[in-house]
Amino acid sequence: MRVHARSGLSVPYTKSSAHEVERGCLAETDPPDPARINTLSFGLFGAATKLSGDETLQETASFIDGLLSGYSGLPVVLGVAWLSWYMWRFKIRPALQPTHPQEMPYWIPVMGQKLYIVTSPQDVSAIYKNTTTLTFDEFVRDMMLSFGASEEGVRKMWESSRTGGNVGSLHKVLAHAGEDYYRQQFHPGDRLNDLWTNIQDRMSLCLQWCTITGENELSTQHDVKSVSLMNLCQNALLSSATSAVFGDRLLELAPNLLKAFIVFDDESWKLIYKLPPFLAKDMHKARQQIFTALQSYFALPRRERAGATWAVDVLETEMRRIQIEDHDIAALFGMPFWV
């Protein structure tokens, strides 16, 4: 955004109470000379912008000079403070730290965390391989809590090491071991083949003439059906994958689960950016529906919800071994269900 100075811009000066602090005492004085104040502000802003060589910044400084014409005290201090921040943030510090990621300039100072966007494929590969100095652990912990897990449940996931079973990852915390379970599930071999065959069979059933009904079907005329391609693909993919991973029981308990998932998936960015509930009502409602469905599912005995994949079974077993409650199990499975 470019801000251009307008020639002849001035602000009327009102002869209200003008004060200045001199030698620790607050004394009432006559209004200061506007020309003197404007000269002072121009000197400060002009000198800084000449040093930077930034044309846009020079124009902005001229604009601020105009606004400060006839004013004293706080506006000048704020203007100098803003320019000092801008110069340090985007001119001086980058020059002193040339190897650091370049930050894109912005106008309004804000509080928050930095977001680094990696665009080079080589850099992306290097980041994923660098597991010693870079980690996703804090982000994963934060997401576990955002999905409704308790502090105690998250603590157990990150402090309890596996000691039983024969599925590997014996010396890792369960949060990391869980990643290994999913890698083993999706690694080429019998486990992946069984899962993929299950998904294919279920998708084939979803695409049969007799099963294209409800929201998928827009109209029918003799041997022709008009369908919503988006609804058809969503239902076929999501229902097939969900039932193949968790078994049929989950969707039997929560027939509207996939609708909630679609809403949550569209609105999930609000969870990541921690928008307050009043700005993310649909997202929080959908997340709660997903949590309720998973909580009802994991509260059932396993014999009443057969058909889950190996990764789900072994991860649940390890969670129960370290005494994680049903509430937290449901919340912790919310993340892989969403992903």
Image (cartoon, rainbow, N blue to C red):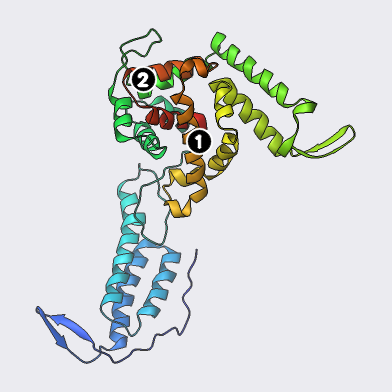
Residue name at image x 53 percent, y 45 percent: 267
Using a 10 Å C-alpha cutoff, classify the residue at mark 2 as few (fewer than 14 neighbours), some (14 to 19) or many (20 or more). few
Give the Cα distance between marks 1 and 2.
21 Å
Q: Which of the marked residues, 1 or 2, is nearer the chain's N terminus?
A: 1
Using a 10 Å C-alpha cutoff, classify the residue at mark 1 as few (fewer than 14 neighbours), some (14 to 19) or many (20 or more). many
- Please indicate whether residue 199 sits to the left or right of residue 158 in the image: right
Provide residue 260's location: percent of width, then percent of height.
Answer: 56, 39
- Please indicate whether residue 292 sits to the left or right of residue 321 in the image: right
Residue 333 sits above or below residue 143 on the image: above
Residue position for label 2: 320
User: Residue 290's mark?
Assistant: 1
Q: Amino acid at mark 2?
A: Arg
Provide residue 137's location: percent of width, then percent of height.
Answer: 35, 31
Q: What is the secondary structure assignment of the residue under circle 2?
A: helix
The answer to whether any part of residue 189 appears in the image is: no
Q: Amino acid at mark 1?
A: Ile
